[in-house]
Image (cartoon, helix red, strand yellow):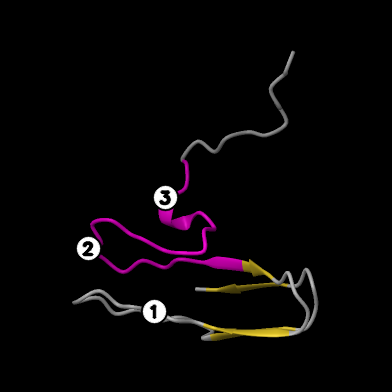
Amino acid sequence: TILPNTSFKCPETPPKAYQLNYPSVAIANLNNNETVTRTVTNMGGKSDYTVSVEEPPGVSVDINPKKLSFQSIGEKQTFT
């Protein structure tokens, strides 16, 4: 018998799909400015990652920071 985990409570308002921490971003029916946050966990040693974006026509994308520099395994960093 598998019992449900009752220690986790679902939020009353679920997050928008594009706010889930997936490695890519897609926003359907974009009509206004949206801020999306991603948190990255380094799985290697010292490493640098630079963002790459293909902006759809009529859309402007601003990434901050544009480069993440990791010093150790398990280190977390966030960009918007």
Q: Position of residue 73 (x, y in %)?
A: 79, 73
The magenta-colored residue range is: 14-39
Q: Amino acid at mark 3?
A: Lys
Q: Nearer the viewer, mark 1 or mark 3?
A: 1
Question: In the drawing, what numbered circle is on residue 31?
Answer: 2
Q: Amino acid at mark 1?
A: Val
Between 10 and 73, the one nearer to me in the picture: 73
Q: Disc 2 and disc 3: Cα gap in Å? A: 15 Å
Name the residue tied to disc 1. Answer: 53
Q: Secondary structure at mark 1?
A: loop
Q: Is residue 75 above or below residue 64?
A: above
Q: Secondary structure at mark 3?
A: loop
Q: Is residue 23 left or right of residue 25?
A: right
Q: Secondary structure at mark 2?
A: loop
Q: Is residue 47 left or right of residue 49?
A: right
Which mark sits nearer the N-terminus, 2 or 1?
2
Question: In the drawing, what numbered circle is on residue 1?
Answer: none
Name the residue tied to disc 3. Answer: 16
Q: Is residue 14 above or below residue 70?
A: above
Disc 2 + disc 1, Cβ < 8 Å: no
- Outermost residue to the top: 1
Q: Is residue 17 above or below residue 32?
A: above
- Outermost residue to the front: 44
Badge 1, how many Cα within 10 Å: few under 14, some, many 20+?
few
Badge 2, how many Cα within 10 Å: few under 14, some, many 20+?
few
Whether 19 is among the magenta residues is: yes
Q: Position of residue 24 (x, y in %)?
A: 45, 64
Instruction: Look at 46% across and 40% down and name the residue there.
Output: 13
Q: Is residue 12 above or below residue 42?
A: above
